[in-house]
Amino acid sequence: MLDDGSDELFGGFWPFMRRFLLAFLPVWVFLLGYAAGINIILAAIFAGMSVSVVAIFEKLKLKQTSDTENDDNNVIKE
């Protein structure tokens, strides 16, 4: 089984945070846009785009974590 390492982000709390954010972040963004007087269609588009922010954040955090862990694992030392 392949391990992507996302279970270890934020001390193992990331899988729960991700599920919560994927469920409620679009709702919050839509309601903020609607309350700000933005057109409903634009608020819905921004809410849909907010889901990708969670995936991008996870990918960047995993890359950052793997880079810091692999700094000492170089086969060729300079």
Image (tube, helix red, strand yellow):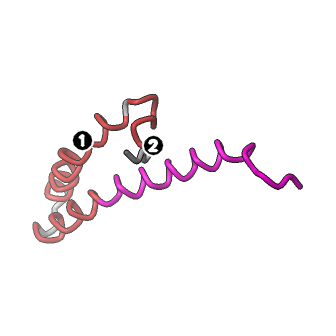
Q: Nearer the viewer, mark 1 or mark 2?
A: 2
The relative height of residue 16 versus residue 58 in the rendered view (above or below) is above
Residue at 43% across, 47% down: 4
Q: Position of residue 44 (x, y in %)?
A: 15, 64
Q: Describe residue 19's horizontal placement relative to residue 2 as left or right.
A: left
Magenta segment: 52-78
Residue identifier under label 1: 19
The relative height of residue 3 versus residue 45 in the rendered view (above or below) is above
Quick one: label 2, few (<14), some, or many (20+) residues within 10 Å?
few
Residue identifier under label 2: 5
Calculate the distance from the C-alpha at mark 1 to the C-alpha at mark 2: 16 Å
Q: Are marks 1 and 2 in contact (CB under 8 Å)?
A: no
Q: Of 30 and 39, which appears nearest the observer?
A: 30
Q: Position of residue 50 (x, y in %)?
A: 28, 58
Q: Position of residue 49 (x, y in %)?
A: 27, 64
Q: Describe residue 20's horizontal placement relative to residue 56 as left or right.
A: left
Quadrant location, the C terminus: bottom right
Which amino acid lies under the numbered mark 1 shown in the image of this protein? Arg
- List the single residue furthest toward the left: 40
Residue at 19% across, 44% down: 24
